[in-house]
Image: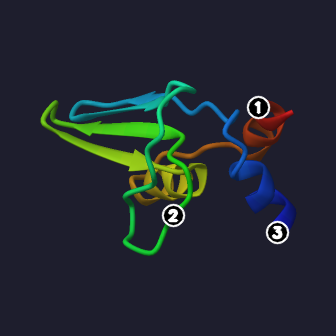
Amino acid sequence: MAEDEGSMADPKFPLTLTGRHFSMTPCAPFLDERCTATCSCQEPATHRLLFRRTSVEWLCNRHALAWAEAHGIEIPQNAASNSAA
């Protein structure tokens, strides 16, 4: 599992999701935001999560995948591994 987590931290893992009330897109490489999922996470943000077009959250890959899983969105592990290569 540690190897998977390492690949998830790779900023090249582009996850793009859209739903009725949200969109998640990869961050532009020049942005210098930190993950806002928890107070203790200081990882660089790799994804922008927009809720209802009014609220933005910055997520690292680990938290982006956790958010997707918590909302019933399945991301195949091989897709993550292939994207990180």
Residue 34 position (above or below residue 31): below
N-term mark: 1 or 2? 2
User: In this figure, which residue is indicated by the disc labeled 2?
Assistant: 42
Mark 1 or 3, nearer chain start: 3
Quadrant of the image occupied by residue 5: bottom right
Residue 76's place in the image compared with 72, above or below, is: above
Q: Residue at x 39, y 53 (%)?
A: 71
Q: Residue 21's spot in the image, x, y percent?
A: 21, 35
Label 2 to label 3: alpha-carbon separation: 18 Å
- Where does residue 33 sit, x and y in percent of width and height? 43, 44
User: What is the C-alpha distance between the residues marked 1 and 2?
Assistant: 23 Å
Secondary structure under the numbered disc 3 in the rendered image: helix
Element assignment for label 2: loop
Q: Is residue 1 visible?
A: no
Where residue 53 appears, as percent x and y from the top left, is 16, 30
Q: Secondary structure at mark 1?
A: helix
Q: Image check: 7 left or right of 71? A: right
The amino acid type of the residue labelled 2 equals: Gln
The three-letter code of the residue at mark 3 reads: Ala
Q: Is residue 16 visible?
A: yes
Give residue 2's mark.
Answer: 3
Separation (CA) of disc 1 from disc 3: 17 Å
Mark 1 crowd level (few <14, some 14–19, many ≥20, 10 Å Cα): some
Q: Which label is found at residue 40? A: none
In the picture, the quarter occupied by the N terminus is bottom right
Say whether marks 1 and 2 touch (CB < 8 Å): no
Task: Name which of mark 2 and mark 3 comes first in the sequence.
Answer: 3
**Mark in front: 2 vs 3:** 2
Q: Residues within 10 Å of mark 2 (few under 14, many from 20)?
A: few
